[in-house]
Amino acid sequence: MNTELVKRILSSIILIPIILYFIIKGSFLFNFFILICFFISIFEWHMMTKNFSYKVFGILFLIFSFYTVYKIRNDFPNNYDYLLLIILICVSTDIGGYVFGNIFKGPKLTQISPKKTYSGMFCGYLLSIIFVNFFLINYNNPTIELTGATLLLIISISTVSQIGDLIVSYFKRLSNIKDTGKIIPGHGGLLDRIDGMLFAFPFSYLILINEFY
């Protein structure tokens, strides 16, 4: 097992309980947490794009994306359930793409991010469905059931997450950098870790608005 993978695993073990605590606890603690994440993301985006004219559009998008995180956590019934579900889909998609993409390899998905493969993409879909199913069975959540509509939602969010990952990878290539920062050992910057989520949250928020309002 290489050093970077060990760092990635250890960082995840430390960060996951902390993030879950803030999400479940809610109130000012959660708001403070996402505010810190927002400022770190803005800083990393600024450092990555300071010589490019499109920087302001990225900042506006980050504002909207973090706003939707706040709204999903605070404005919907069983609010943190939906937030956790979206995060679970994005994380499991990322894990499936990273782990199984490296195992099975095969044709590359795109030149924008050469490490991404078709096998990783499909395994990302599969793992997100498995993880969500496991989550729903063990969590016994009466508000969310694994139906055909839920499966379609999982695949849609997973797709948006993967597209978001590619978009951020594209901007990193334009800036000629590998990672957006070094704040998370083994992962790089915060934007490296939440790139797919930044797009999945607004997408999911628009769906939830249509569902509840």
Image (cartoon, rainbow, N blue to C red):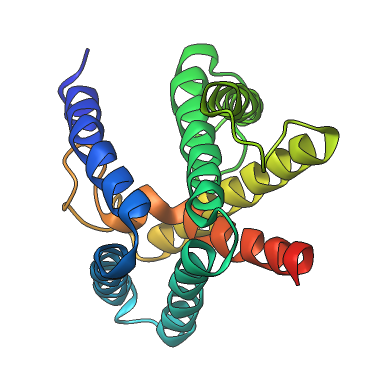
Please give left or right for residue 16 compared with residue 196 in the image.
left
Corner quadrant of residue 144: top right
Residue 42 is at least partly visible in this image: yes
Residue 105, compared with residue 208, is above or below; it is above
Residue 114 is at least partly visible in this image: no
Question: 132 or 195: nearer the eye?
Answer: 132
Looking at the image, which residue is at 57% across and 49% down? 161
Number of numbered discs on residues: 0
Looking at the image, which residue is at 58% across and 28% down? 140
Task: Indicate the quadrant containing the C terminus: top left, top right, bottom left or bottom right.
Answer: bottom right
Please give left or right for residue 141 compared with residue 14 in the image.
right
Residue 79 coordinates in the image, percent (x, y)? 52, 57
Residue farthest along the right direction in this orientation: 148
Task: Indicate the quadrant containing the N terminus: top left, top right, bottom left or bottom right.
Answer: top left
Residue 86 coordinates in the image, percent (x, y)? 55, 47
Residue 184 coordinates in the image, percent (x, y)? 19, 46
Please give left or right for residue 3 compared with residue 88 in the image.
left
Corner quadrant of residue 152: top right
Looking at the image, which residue is at 27% across and 46% down? 21
Residue 26, compared with residue 118, is above or below; it is below
Residue 184, compared with residue 107, is above or below; it is below
Residue 59, compared with residue 109, is above or below; it is below
Looking at the image, which residue is at 30% across and 50% down? 178
Residue 55 coordinates in the image, percent (x, y)? 41, 82
Question: 77 or 191: nearer the eye?
Answer: 77
